[in-house]
Image (cartoon, rainbow, N blue to C red):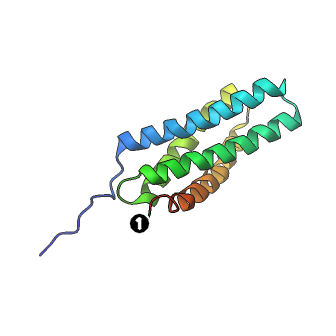
Amino acid sequence: MLEPTTAGLRPRLGPIIRDVAIIFLLTFIGGFVIGFAGGGRTPRTMAAVAISNMSLGTVGFTISGCLAVGKRWNHLAFVALGVWLIGLMNIEIAGISFWQWVFSSIFVAIMMGLGGALSYAFKRGD
């Protein structure tokens, strides 16, 4: 009798770290450029940073979905968890509150869903 395989079910730490780094760098660069050009923490600049983070985060999750080996959505879920945990540094760096960080999980989940769905346009299957 064949035993069920766990290939593709176990998280692979290397690709997860790679993809968290890709998403972090994309959103960091976008936020840095807008913050630098915006000239301060005005409501308009903060809205632009939020739009940039959502857009570039979605691009990052699309890349992650295309690079995923095995179960794409399992991989993306672990990447999303890593992105959310890395966002914890924004409490100290960007001055957001703990509860803002907690609720940012909703936006990370949206980016993961959009990016994961878009990745099927570039790479079929799971």
Residue lying farthest to the front in this orientation:
122
Q: Which residue is mark 1?
A: 125
Residue lying farthest to the bottom in this orientation:
1
Q: Quadrant of the N terminus?
A: bottom left
Taking the image as shown, residue 34 lies to the left or right of residue 27, namely: right
Taking the image as shown, residue 79 lies to the left or right of residue 50, namely: left
Taking 47 as reference, is 36 above or below it?
above
Question: Residue 78: x and y, percent?
Answer: 46, 50
Closest to the observer: 120 or 112? Answer: 120
Question: Residue 29: x and y, percent?
Answer: 64, 30
Q: Image quarter for residue 124?
A: bottom left
In this orientation, does residue 64 appear? yes
Label 1 amino acid?
Answer: Gly
Secondary structure under the numbered disc 1 in the rendered image: loop
Q: Residue at x 68, y 34 (%)?
A: 30
Q: Residues within 10 Å of mark 1 (few under 14, many from 20)?
A: few
